[in-house]
Image (tube, coloured by chain):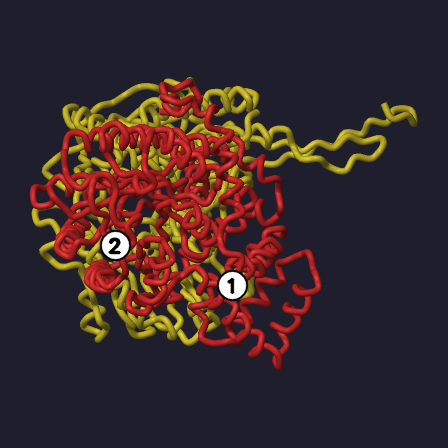
Chain colours: A red, B yellow
Amino acid sequence: MAELCTDAPTADPAPPQALDAEILALGRRLARGGSRLGRARRAAHDRGMALVARDPQLRAALFRLVDVAPACAGPAELAEHMGAYLAGVERRTAPVAVASRAAVAPAARWAVGRAAIAAVRAIAGRFIVGETPAGAARTLRGLWQHGSAVSVDLLGESTVTPAEGRAYAARCDAALVQLAADAARWPAQPLLERDAAGALPRANLSVKVTALTPLVRAEAPERGRADAADLLRPLLRRARDVGAHLHVDMESMDSRELILDLVLELLSEPEFAAGPSAGIVLQAYLRDAEETLDRVLEWARASGRTPPLTIRLVKGAYWDHETIEAAQHGWVPPVWTEKAESDRCFERVTRRLIDAWADERLVRPAIASHNLRSVAHAVVYARHRGLAAQDLELQALRGLGDDLQDALVAEGLRGRTYCPVGDLVAGMAYLVRRLLENTSDDSFLASRVGGADLDRLLSAP
Amino acid sequence: MTPFRNEPLLELRRASERERLLDALAELDRTLPIAVPTIVAGERRRDADFASVDPGDPERVVAEAAAATQADVDAAVATAGDAARAWGALPATARAAVLARAAGHLRAGRQELAALAVRECAKPWAEADADVCEAIDFLEYYAQEAVRLAAGPALVQLPGERNTLHHRPRGVVAVIAPWNFPIAIATGMTAAGLATGNAVCLKPAEQSPACALALVEALLAAGVPAGAIALLPGEGDVGAALVAHPGVHTIAFTGSGAVGLEILRRAAEPAPGQRHLKRVIAEMGGKNCIIVDADADLEDVVPALLESAFAFAGQKCSAASRALVHERVAGALTERLVGALDTLLVGQAEVFGTDVPPMIEASARERVERYAAGAAEAGATVHRTDAEQVPSGDGFFAAPTLVLAPAADAAVVRDEIFGPLLTVEPVASVEAACELVEAQSHALTGGLFSRNPRTIEAVARRTPVGNLYVNRGSTGAMVGRQPFGGNRLSGTGTKAGGPEYLLHFVEPVVVTENTVRHGLAM
């Protein structure tokens, strides 16, 4: 499996190195781009994150605090947890010491807890656009008017009962209807609404299979597949009928086969031969990412379905989970262990996706990364393959890729913002994952905040 | 010596691994029934005195076994006594090499062995595979630990004297093994005895003689001397004969509390002519509680409780049988647990994805039915998996059962049921839950879900249980990582798979030599 993802010379029409100068130039522009106002607004938060990222124990304390916040009955209880978490932080910087003392002082406890709740809400507010699709409508419309398409993700607690799966499906169904109705009133954005294969739906919903079914069993993918199919089929019908795009997210390896089989099987059913627009996700941090791509491309060739399947290419958000699980079971990790390997795999798959579009109009590429090098590489390669701006989608996460999204708009590129919608309890797992990403040592964002040399970051991985 | 590493589990999320297991099962089915002989001094005596059957289809005979007689027991113990001298005289490294080879044999046949555990004990695939891995782990871990033990601990040394501490094998170990980890536990107790230079007479559970035969074959093929390992299949009388035998030095037992107490009583009385005290290593039952604090993440709690209480139909001594839930979240958790009961697939062990396989035998199922009915009669709310979701037919299937808020003194919260039944009991606080745990006579495993480090510390400090699991399920102890065993009436406090376990199989001897001659330290 590994040999498919080596650095052996490929038959790319343009050798990747030849593009490096252009990638560098575009990367620099993207790094400078974006609105100054937005940057200033986010700078304070980024500085805070950088501070936290430097001390692993403080970082752990913060994550645990964010994680437990929704389960605490009130400020005093949250303060009690905070005191216990901070007690484990050895570097007693002044803020840590003050907060630790206050959290255990009876008089200050309530105020500390209130402040912590407010802080958690503020962090959540940056990543989560609203509690409901209706509540998020203004923000979504604002993004669209600003020049970015959106995809809405309904945050849910993980599903442990069939009733929870049905409730999530009902929320998705309602969201499709609502989004389609709202989006119909948005102003025209020619760049965002059409590519060479035809119309691109404005309403776009991402769904999670593990939220649809409690029957995900790694050793028995058919169990969860059958259960999820019963709920996903009506959602596909709804998306088709209201003209929305339905994107099925990818999660950990334990559900990868299930999700891939499920989506490809359902989309092969005759009733979906001409819609809706649908998509899946490829994770470049998986060692067998290119084998999965082979399979998807083969399917796309054989199915002849329209509109073409959208493939969102990501690095992958479950690296720690996969690595820990593999270590505990004595398995070879399914993910690349070096970040540069993931970055290289990401570029290889990017080129193959763009080739598949340029040569055969096979699948719609959607490149989802906050790494300026990865993004610039995709854009430059697409241009070399003769693609127009609307033929390449670039996705970023709300709260994490806001600067990038601004820069993409300024550059005249077609961007889409992934917008989580949901309440704080439901959003906590998502929030912790995003915070981890935002503060992890090798994160591109952290190095940017730290002022690392931009050109080095824009060089080939 | 390379550091100990647990044998990797099969990556069952890959279809190719699953196919290999199904192939191995099909192959096994063609060879059934397996003839299990008595093996004494390498001599095999075949007979068909009793049979083990597939718990999911009792018409299918898995093994036809010879039952050991008193004469077999006498011959086995006498042979073992002789063989133990030569085996015990080998350097620990030589014995370790043999055990490592036996581990290699198990590893080479791991698919076939897992298939056997599926058929003979209805262990679902993942658990059957884990059973094989744990057996391999025990062989390798104890082999290494015995070498470490042989090096002896450092004693204080002063000029003019030399002090050494040796550990000698005790002699003959009677291993009385259970069916619920039919390969792993039999292997663990046997490997501990052999690694430390003892000879072993193995009496497997009458429900799983074929799994034990596979172990003995591997040991013999690896080079354990024929006299140093005997296989004595049979029922309780064979175990009783071993326990009473004056030639047995150590009894390693895993099983029910009633039998364990009987062994302790019998072993305490020296037989005429017996010149040693018998030592008993007993791992018995549990009544394991998982405490759920108000700040717990219920998304983690629900799957962990289901897995801990219902996997392998609750037939693990580590399985959870009581959930003690903070009253603030008891309602929400109960609702989700009741809903999640429907997600459990009750079915044949050989079907990938089965959560709850059939129980080992009809009487086990009847026990669960009795307690479920009793709890309902006593006024508790009882939720069970719908009858139509439980396979019909002759397999010993029991519906997974939740008993909500039973009376504090109900039988269902007091007795070990050893089946897929979980009580859910609201408590006013974690302290109140600790009081309930404190009041129990069993103390094997326990669980705690809390996100407050101070709560975790407080519960860890006061819990009487042998193994406390925090923010995870209460089953699945790994060799070398979670040394396993209970306190109070749950066992003798020995920790299988831990660094102190082998000490129970040896006798310490200290030699002090005066090295002063003519006023000089030589």
Residue type at numbered disc 1: Leu
Residue type at numbered disc 2: Arg
Q: Nearer the viewer, residue B367 or A136?
A: A136
The chain containing the residue under callout 2 comes to: A
Where is mark 1, residue-wise?
A65
Percent position (x, y) of residue B357? 21, 46
Residue A34, compared with residue A12, is above or below; it is: below
Residue drawn at (8%, 49%), measured in percent from left and top? B392
Task: Tell me, yes or no, if residue B400 can be seen here.
Answer: yes
Q: Viewed as shown, does residue A325 lie left or right of A62? A: left
Q: Residues within 10 Å of mark 2 (few under 14, many from 20)?
A: many
* Image quarter of residue B164: top right
Where is mark 2, residue-wise?
A202
How far apart marks 1 and 2 lie (CA) works out to 37 Å
| Mark carried by residue B507 | none
Residue drawn at (43%, 39%), measured in percent from left and top? A375
Q: Nearer the viewer, residue B268 or A392?
A: A392
Badge 1 or badge 2: first in the primary sequence: 1
Q: Which quadrant does the C terminus of chain B fall into?
A: top right
Q: Viewed as shown, does residue B475 lie left or right of B375? A: right
Percent position (x, y) of residue A237? 13, 53
Percent position (x, y) of residue B408? 34, 74
The chain containing the residue under callout 1 comes to: A
Residue drawn at (11%, 49%), measured in percent from left and top? B391
